[in-house]
Image: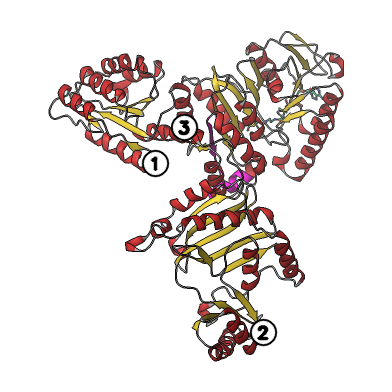
C-alpha cells in the first residue's frame, strides 16, 4: 500500500466510533462525513447499531467487506487486539489516534512495540499512535478529530505536534492558505516525516511541503529524502527543541530524543531544507511560494514613501543571502523624470511622504521592468494623505501584466492601511506589516532557486590510495592495548593511510632511540611527550622545538621526562615522539565529531591555540560531502581571508585543503569507530598543507 492510497482510501472503518457528542469517536465519524468523503464508511462499536446515520458494526470481522483504512480510537491497551483484527481483515493502513504509548513510559513503549510488530506482520502501514489523524482535501478525506477542516490548496503540512496542527488549521481559516494534505505524525512508530515528505514531493496536488518537527526519526532516511524532495518542491521545516531547555521539553513531549541543533542546522542547509525560525515564518514562506513566481536571482528592489522603513529593509536584505538591486541608467533617468526632485531614485526608491498612486505606479513600473531586479518589495507608510486603496489599485494594475517577478507588500500600520492590504491579499500578493518577514520570505525563495541550479547527482568523490586495512589494524592494535585515544604517531599513520599529509613522527622509548629517529628524519626536529592523558602538552613542558643535533635530542628527551614527572608524578608516559619540524604555515583546524542522528560532522576553521576563543569554525555533514560543499565551508570562515593571502602574504593552497577535508570525511564514513578527530594545527602553504598534530579517539 502506498501512502497516497492511505490518503485516498476507498473505504474507511472507524474503530471506537461513538454516538456520544463530544467524544473523539463521534468527531471522527462526523468529520469524515462532513469532509465530503465519497468512499464507504464503517463505524465499529459493539454497543451501537447506527451512528450519524450510518450502519454500525460490532467489530471489524462483521463488516465482511474490503477495508483500506482503519482509524482507531479505543483506549490504548485495546489497540493491539484491534490492530490484530485489522490485519486479519486485510486492512492496509492504520491511523491510531489513541494516546498512552511511548510518550507515557516503559509500559506504553512495550504496547507501541507490540502494535508495530502486528502492523509489520500483516504489512499494514501505521500513522501514530497518539495523533490527531490525517486529511487530504483533494480526496476529500478528513480522518481526524480536528475541529477545523482546512481550505483545499497546495500546501502539505506535516506536524509532529497534534496541538500545533489543530491550532494552525484553525488560524488558517482566516487566511487564504489552502492545504492539500495535513498529517499528524504522533509518535511516528512506523511512518515518519520522511515518508510523508517523499509522498508529498511526488504528489501533483502539492506545491510546497511544510513540516513542524521536534526530531527526525531516521537521520540517513531523512537526509536522502529531503535532498531529493527539495530539488522538486520547497521543503520548509520548523524544528523546535533548538535550545537546550527546548530539547528537554521536546523529549518529554513525544519521547523524542532531540539531536544537537548544530547537526540539524547543518543537515538542513546541506540538503536543501529551508529552515523557518518560527511558526509564522513557516507559513509566510509557504504563502510566498504558493502565490509568487520563483525569483531569477537575489537582487531586490525596494519602493517606499518613507526613509526609515527603507533603511530597515535594506539592513535586513544585506544581512542575509540577498542584495539590493542596482538599477540600470535608463531606469534611474526615467525615475528622475517622473518623480519629484526630492525623491530618491536609487534603491530604495523613495516616492516621498505625499507620494500617491501615480508616483507609486511610475516607480513600480520602471523598477519591475529593470533587468537588474529579481524581486520587488513595496513599502507603504500611513502619511496623512496616503490612500492605501488607490495606491494598491494602481500597483495591482501594473502587476497584473507583469507576473514574472515576485512582488511583496509591506504596509506598515494597521486599520488605516486595511483596504489596501486586503486588495493585495485578494490579488494573491503577500502583504506584511513589517519588512523583516517579507525579506525572509524572499531569502527562502532565493535559496530554493539556487539549490535547483546545483546539478542533481553530483558524483561521489573518488580517492586514490586509500589504505583502509592499515587503519583497521592500527585501530585494532590500540584497542587490544585497552586504549581509546591514539598516540600522535599512531594518529599520523592513520591520517597518512588516507592520504592526509602528516609531518613524519616516531615514538622513541629512550634518549638514544630518540636521537636515532631524529637522525633518520633529519634536523631540525620537535620532541613531544607521548601521553594521550596530557591535553595541553606545552603547559607542562612536554614540547621542545627546533632541536638541531642528536645531543640536543638526547638531552631534550630527559628534560621532557623530568618536566612531565614534576607535574604528574604518577603518570606513566609512552615515551617521547620525535617529529620533523615543519616550516610555519597558516594554522587551520580540521575536526570530526559525530551526531547521533546524522553521523559524522566535519569542522574547518582557524587553528592554533585560540580555537575555542575565536570559534571561527564551519561545519558540514560527512554524508555525501562534495568538494563544492567543502569549498563553500572554507569560504564561510574568517580563516579563508587569511588563506587568500592576508596583508601581502602569498595565497595558500585551498585545493589541497579541500582534498584533505574530503579525505577526513571519507575516513569518518569508512570508520564509524573513530568518534572524534582533531587536526590542529594543520599548516597550509602556498603549495600543499601538512598536519602537525592529529588526535584520534575511538569507541
Ligand atoms: N471496538 C470497537 N469499539 C470499541 C472497542 C473495540 N474493541 N472498545 C471500545 N470501543 C468503543 C467504546 O464502547 C466507546 O464507545 P461509546 O462512546 O459508545 O461508549 C468508544 O469505543 C470509545 O471507547 P471509550 O472507552 O469510551 O474511550 P474514550 O472515547 O473515552 O477514549 C480515546 C478513547 C479517545 C482513544 C482515549 O483513550 C485517548 O487516547 N484520548 C487521547 C487522544 C489524544 O489525545 N491523541 C493524541 C492527539 S495529539 C494532541 O496532542 C492533540
Bounds of the magenta segment? 234-251
Q: Quadrant of the C terminus?
A: bottom right
Viewed as shown, does residue 277 lie left or right of 414? right
Q: Residues within 10 Å of mark 1 (few under 14, many from 20)?
A: few
Task: Locate residue 665, reporting x and y percent.
Answer: 60, 54
Q: Does the residue tagged 1 have its C-beta within 8 Å of any atom of ligand 1?
A: no
Residue 509: mark in rendering:
2
Q: CA distance from mark 2 to mark 3?
A: 60 Å
**Residue 240 forms part of the magenta stretch:** yes
Secondary element under disc 1, as helix, strand or loop, is loop
Instruction: Indicate whether 316 appears above or below 304.
Output: below
Viewed as shown, does residue 325 lie left or right of 269? left
Q: Mark 1, mark 2: which one is toward the viewer?
A: 2
Q: Which quadrant would residue 284 be assigned to in this image?
A: top left
Furthest residue to the left? Answer: 341
Residue linked to disc 1: 320
Secondary element under disc 2, as helix, strand or loop, is loop
Task: Locate residue 345, reporting x and y percent.
Answer: 20, 30
Instruction: Indicate whether 531 appears above or below 271.
Output: below
Q: Quadrant of ligand 1?
A: top right
Q: Quadrant of the N terminus?
A: top right
Q: CA distance from mark 1 to mark 3?
A: 15 Å
Judging depth in this view, the residue of 542 and 247 nearest the camera is: 542
Viewed as shown, does residue 10 lie left or right of 533? right
Residue linked to disc 3: 449
Amino acid at each position: 500500500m502506498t501512502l497516497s492510497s492511505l490518503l485516498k482510501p476507498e473505504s474507511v472503518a472507524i474503530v471506537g466510533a461513538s454516538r456520544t457528542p463530544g467524544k473523539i469517536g463521534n468527531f471522527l465519524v462526523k468529520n469524515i462525513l462532513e469532509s465530503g468523503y465519497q468512499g464507504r464508511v464503517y463505524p465499529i462499536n459493539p454497543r451501537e447499531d447506527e451512528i450519524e446515520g450510518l450502519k454500525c458494526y460490532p467489530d471489524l470481522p462483521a463488516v465482511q467487506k474490503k477495508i483500506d483504512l482503519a482509524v482507531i480510537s479505543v483506549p490504548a491497551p485495546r489497540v493491539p487486539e484491534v490492530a490484530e483484527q485489522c490485519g486479519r481483515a486485510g486492512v492496509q493502513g492504520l491511523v491510531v489516534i489513541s494516546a498512552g504509548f511511548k510518550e507515557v513510559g516503559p509500559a506504553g513503549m512495550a504496547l507501541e512495540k507490540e502494535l508495530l510488530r502486528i502492523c509489520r506482520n500483516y504489512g499494514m502501514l501505521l500513522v501514530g499512535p497518539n495523533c490527531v489523524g490525517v486529511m487530504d482535501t483533494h480526496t476529500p478525506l478528513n480522518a481526524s478529530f480536528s475541529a477545523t477542516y482546512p481550505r483545499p490548496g497546495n500546501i502539505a503540512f506535516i506536524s509532529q505536534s497534534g496541538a500545533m496542527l489543530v491550532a494552525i488549521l484553525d488560524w488558517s481559516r482566516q487566511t487564504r492558505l489552502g492545504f492539500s494534505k495535513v498529517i499528524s505524525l504522533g509518535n511516528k512508530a512506523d511512518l515518519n516525516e520522511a515518508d510523508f515528505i517523499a509522498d508529498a514531493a511526488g504528489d501533483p496536488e502539492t506545491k510546497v511541503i511544510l513540516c513542524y518537527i521536534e526530531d527526525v526519526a531516521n537521520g540517513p532516511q531523512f537526509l536522502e529524502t529531503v535532498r531529493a524532495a527539495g530539488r522538486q518542491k520547497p521543503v520548509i521545516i520548523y524544528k523546535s527543541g533548538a535550545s537546550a531547555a527546548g530539547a528537554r521539553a521536546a523529549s518529554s513531549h513525544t519521547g523524542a530524543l532531540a539531536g544537537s541543533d548544530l547537526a540539524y542546522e547543518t543537515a538542513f542547509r546541506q540538503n536543501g531544507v529551508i529552515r523557518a525560525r518560527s511558526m509564522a515564518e513557516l507559513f509566510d514562506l509557504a504563502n510566498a511560494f504558493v502565490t509568487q513566481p520563483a525569483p531569477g536571482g537575489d537582487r531586490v528592489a525596494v519602493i517606499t514613501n518613507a526613509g526609515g522603513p527603507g533603511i530597515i529593509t535594506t539592513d535586513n536584505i544585506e544581512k542575509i543571502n540577498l542584495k539590493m538591486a542596482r538599477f540600470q541608467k535608463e531606469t534611474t533617468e526615467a525615475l528622475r523624470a517622473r518623480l519629484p526632485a526630492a525623491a530618491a531614485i536609487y534603491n530604495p526608491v523613495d516616492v516621498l511622504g505625499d507620494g500617491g498612486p501615480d508616483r507609486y505606479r511610475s516607480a513600480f513600473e520602471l523598477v519591475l521592468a529593470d533587468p537588474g531586479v529579481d524581486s520587488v518589495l513595496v513599502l507603504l507608510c500611513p502619511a496623512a494623505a496616503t490612500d492605501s486603496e488607490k495606491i494598491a489599485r494602481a500597483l495591482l494594475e501594473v502587476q497584473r501584466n507583469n507576473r514574472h517577478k515576485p512582488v511583496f507588500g509591506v504596509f506598515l500600520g494597521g486599520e488605516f492601511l486595511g483596504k489596501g492590504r486586503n486588495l493585495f491579499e485578494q490579488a494573491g500578493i503577500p502583504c506584511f506589516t513589517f519588512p523583516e518577514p517579507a525579506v525572509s520570505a524572499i531569502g527562502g525563495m532565493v535559496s530554493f532557486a539556487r539549490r535547483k541550479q546545483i546539478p542533481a547527482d553530483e558524483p561521489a568523490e573518488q580517492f586514490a590510495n586509500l589504505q583502509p586495512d592499515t587503519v583497521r589494524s592500527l585501530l585494532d592494535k590500540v584497542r587490544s592495548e585497552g586504549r581509546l585515544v591514539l598516540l600522535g604517531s599512531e594518529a599520523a599513520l592513520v591520517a597518512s593511510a588516507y592520504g592526509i599529509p602528516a609531518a613524519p613522527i616516531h615514538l622513541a622509548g629512550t634518549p638514544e632511540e630518540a636521537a636515532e629517529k631524529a637522525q633518520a628524519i633529519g634536523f631540525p626536529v620537535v620532541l613531544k611527550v607521548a601521553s594521550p592523558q596530557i591535553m595541553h602538552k606545552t603547559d607542562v613542558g612536554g614540547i621542545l622545538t627546533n632541536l638541531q643535533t642528536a645531543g640536543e635530542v638526547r638531552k631534550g628527551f630527559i628534560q621532557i621526562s623530568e618536566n612531565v614527572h614534576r607535574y604528574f608524578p604518577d603518570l606513566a608516559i609512552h615515551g617521547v615522539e620525535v617529529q620533523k619540524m615543519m616550516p610555519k604555515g597558516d594554522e587551520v583546524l580540521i575536526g570530526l565529531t559525530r551526531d547521533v542522528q546524522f553521523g559524522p560532522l566535519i569542522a574547518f576553521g582557524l587553528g592554533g591555540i585560540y580555537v575555542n576563543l575565536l570559534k571561527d569554525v564551519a561545519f558540514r555533514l560527512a554524508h555525501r560531502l562534495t568538494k563544492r560543499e567543502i569549498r563553500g565551508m572554507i569560504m564561510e570562515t574568517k580563516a579563508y581571508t587569511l588563506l587568500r593571502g592576508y596583508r601581502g602574504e602569498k595565497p595558500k593552497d585551498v585545493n589541497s585543503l579541500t582534498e584533505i577535508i574530503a579525505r577526513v570525511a571519507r575516513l569518518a564514513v569508512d570508520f564509524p569507530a573513530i568518534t572524534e578527530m582533531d587536526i590542529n594545527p594543520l599548516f597550509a602553504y602556498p603549495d600543499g598543507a601538512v598536519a602537525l598534530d592529529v588526535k584520534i579517539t575511538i569507541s
